[in-house]
Image (cartoon, helix red, strand yellow):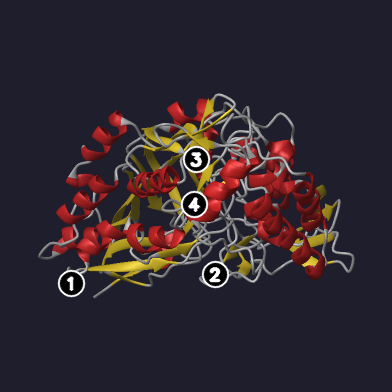
């Protein structure tokens, strides 16, 4: 098993969740306008409430929480700076790497404590990684650590990882949060209350988690990096884009992630600032190979040419994004030039004609008694997905393929994924292994939200392994070029757009910035990726 996408790791709240989010009182939120003075004004400056669209299933890193960093409650051996370069966290320096690239040695920071006052040690690091790799642990991300052969603690405060093969991006996997063995080690890893009452070394402690409503944090006064100036930080879980915008406008929120059309509504608000984050986040359509229509390679190839990606980027994203031709953005050095697909409806129709899909009386194509029609699901309340789904269906209709768009929660959608198409998303910066292996590896078909299309291509499987197991940049580049070119010939998904993330935040603090973000937006990312370093404006 390997990492789930945001679809699995986070769930959208339902109607009850929305009602709960709306019920958040002003007392639970900051007062963006401040008060005339005294303790109220100070408290307002020290408090921030932001609106996000999803919530985690767990707060335990042993089960997948915070695996890409920025968990607020925990630290990894390393972390990322604003430019996504690795820097030390619980380690005092970047790892020493052996010549054969099979051994990584980390010297640990001294004097660090968990928020319960107990010391952090090398044993906690070994416990964390060993527990995640235990076959009994229900962590969908454990495949990301497949390269680890052994992890051990040395007496001098160092941790040594020995790898099975020279996994090039291994150091980037060590942003994984470290948990305390003295607490988590005394519980069942899958059912213990550590998942809802965690203790870490991070800049914040959990104050309260109200499911489908909010996650509230309070500053950790003994944080090794210095006590945060923002003393209370709350993530309000608000699934619906319109509701997040309304609550931000009313002053109930200090910030929120918003789609482009809603973010534009705050352009004239002099008290708010829009922050744009470049991302690896894509939207795509899964085309399950077991479906009688989408399982036909000709249909998938035709849809790849029928879709007007530029129109989606221009009209749906208002320019806050660009066409996507695969999981790798066109501006990445890993992108295989020449794999861009044109918008060519005539070529799409020719492919279908030659494959035996002939137009029926109503213009919808048929082949061997099968009508070229299938449903396309998208997440309720997500207007970007809805707009992408509608545009995709419209383009497909012009080629003679009838797509019916339907909305639902992930609880409704997940059981249907094997046979029905989904307007999905994904993407992870840092290394092509991160955003391609779980998406395309045939052995992961049906593994939660991994390989949702049940895609299988021997050439792609081999290239995925070559790219993962080689330490040679040239070999890896050739492998990922192969994958992208195979996706032109045999697409398991129709990639639509890469999306910039837009956040509107009250202009009350200094120190805000954004990183290059993964698909996992709003919770571990956003301008609050470094909220512990914010300072109130005077």
Label at residue 7: 3
Label 2 or label 1, whichever comes before in sequence order:
2
Label 1 sits on residue: 270
Going by the picture, which residue comes out furthest to the bottom?
538
Label 4, secondary structure: give it.
helix
Marking on residue 306: 4
Q: Of callouts 3 and 1, which one flags the residue occurring earlier in the amino acid sequence?
A: 3
- CA gap, disc 2 to disc 3? 26 Å
User: For the residues marked 3 and 1, what is the alpha-carbon distance in whole angstroms?
Assistant: 35 Å
Quarter in which the N terminus is drawn: top right
Drawn side of residue 11 relative to residue 22, left or right: right
Tell me which label, 2 or 4, sits earlier in the chain. Answer: 2
Q: Residue 81 carries which label?
A: 2
Q: Nearer the viewer, mark 3 or mark 1?
A: 3
Q: Which of marks 1 and 4 is nearer the N terminus?
A: 1
Q: How far across and down, in percent of the image, does residue 26 sit? A: 18, 46
Q: Which residue is drawn at 19% across and 42% down?
A: 25
In this orientation, does residue 399 appear? yes
- Give the residue displayed 74% in from the left and 32% down from the top: 135
- The answer to whether marks 3 and 1 mark residues whose Cβ atoms lie closer than 8 Å is no
**Which residue is found at the position 67% from the left and 67% from the top?**
92
Q: Residues within 10 Å of mark 2 (few under 14, many from 20)?
A: some
């Amino acid at each position: 098993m390997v990492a789930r996408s945001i679809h699995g790791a986070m769930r959208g709240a339902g109607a009850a969740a929305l009602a709960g989010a709306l019920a958040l009182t002003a007392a639970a939120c900051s007062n963006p306008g401040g008060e005339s003075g005294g303790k109220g004004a100070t408290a307002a400056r020290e408090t921030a409430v932001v609106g996000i669209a999803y919530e985690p299933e767990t707060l335990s890193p042993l089960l997948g929480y915070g695996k890409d960093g920025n968990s607020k409650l925990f630290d990894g051996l390393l972390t990322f700076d604003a430019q996504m370069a690795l820097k030390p966290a619980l380690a005092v320096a970047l790892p020493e790497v052996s010549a054969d690239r099979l051994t990584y040695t980390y010297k640990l920071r001294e004097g660090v404590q968990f928020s319960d006052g107990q010391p952090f040690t090398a044993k906690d690091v070994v416990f964390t990684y060993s527990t995640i790799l235990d076959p009994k642990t229900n962590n969908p991300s454990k495949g990301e650590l497949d390269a680890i052969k052994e992890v051990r603690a040395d007496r001098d405060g160092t941790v040594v990882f020995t790898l099975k093969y020279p996994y090039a991006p291994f150091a980037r996997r060590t942003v994984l949060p470290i948990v305390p063995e003295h607490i988590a080690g005394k519980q069942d890893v899958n059912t213990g209350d550590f998942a809802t009452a965690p203790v870490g070394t991070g800049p914040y402690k959990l104050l309260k988690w109200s499911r489908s409503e909010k996650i509230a944090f309070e500053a950790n006064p003994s944080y090794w990096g210095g006590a945060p100036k923002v003393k209370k930080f709350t993530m309000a879980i608000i699934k619906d884009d319109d509701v997040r915008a309304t609550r931000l406008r009313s002053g109930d929120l200090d910030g929120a992630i918003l789609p482009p059309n809603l973010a534009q509504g705050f352009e004239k608000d002099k008290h708010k600032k829009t922050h744009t984050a470049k991302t690896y986040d894509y939207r795509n359509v899964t085309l399950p190979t077991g479906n009688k229509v989408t399982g036909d390679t000709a249909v998938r190839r035709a849809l790849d040419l029928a879709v007007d990606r530029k129109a989606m980027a221009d009209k749906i994203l208002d320019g806050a994004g660009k066409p996507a031709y695969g999981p790798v953005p066109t501006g990445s050095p890993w992108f295989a030039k020449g794999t861009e697909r044109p918008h060519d409806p005539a070529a799409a129709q020719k492919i279908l004609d030659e494959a035996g899909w002939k137009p029926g009386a109503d213009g919808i194509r048929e082949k061997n008694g099968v009508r070229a029609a299938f449903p396309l699901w998208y997440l309720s309340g997500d207007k970007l997905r809805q707009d992408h789904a509608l545009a995709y269906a419209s383009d497909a209709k012009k080629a003679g393929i009838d797509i019916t768009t339907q909305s639902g929660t992930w609880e409704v959608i997940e059981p249907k994924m094997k046979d029905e198409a989904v307007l999905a998303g994904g993407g992870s910066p840092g290394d092509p292994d991160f955003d391609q292996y779980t998406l395309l590896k045939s052995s992961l078909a049906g593994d939660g939200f991994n390989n949702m299309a049940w895609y299988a291509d021997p050439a792609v499987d081999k290239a995925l392994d070559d790219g993962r197991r080689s330490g040679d940049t040239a070999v890896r580049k050739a492998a990922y070029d192969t994958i992208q070119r195979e996706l032109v010939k045999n697409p398991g998904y129709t990639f639509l757009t890469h999306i910039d993330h837009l956040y509107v935040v009250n202009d009350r603090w200094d120190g805000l910035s954004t990183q290059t973000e993964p698909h996992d937006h709003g919770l571990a990312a956003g301008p609050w990726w470094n909220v512990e370093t914010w300072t109130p404006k005077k």
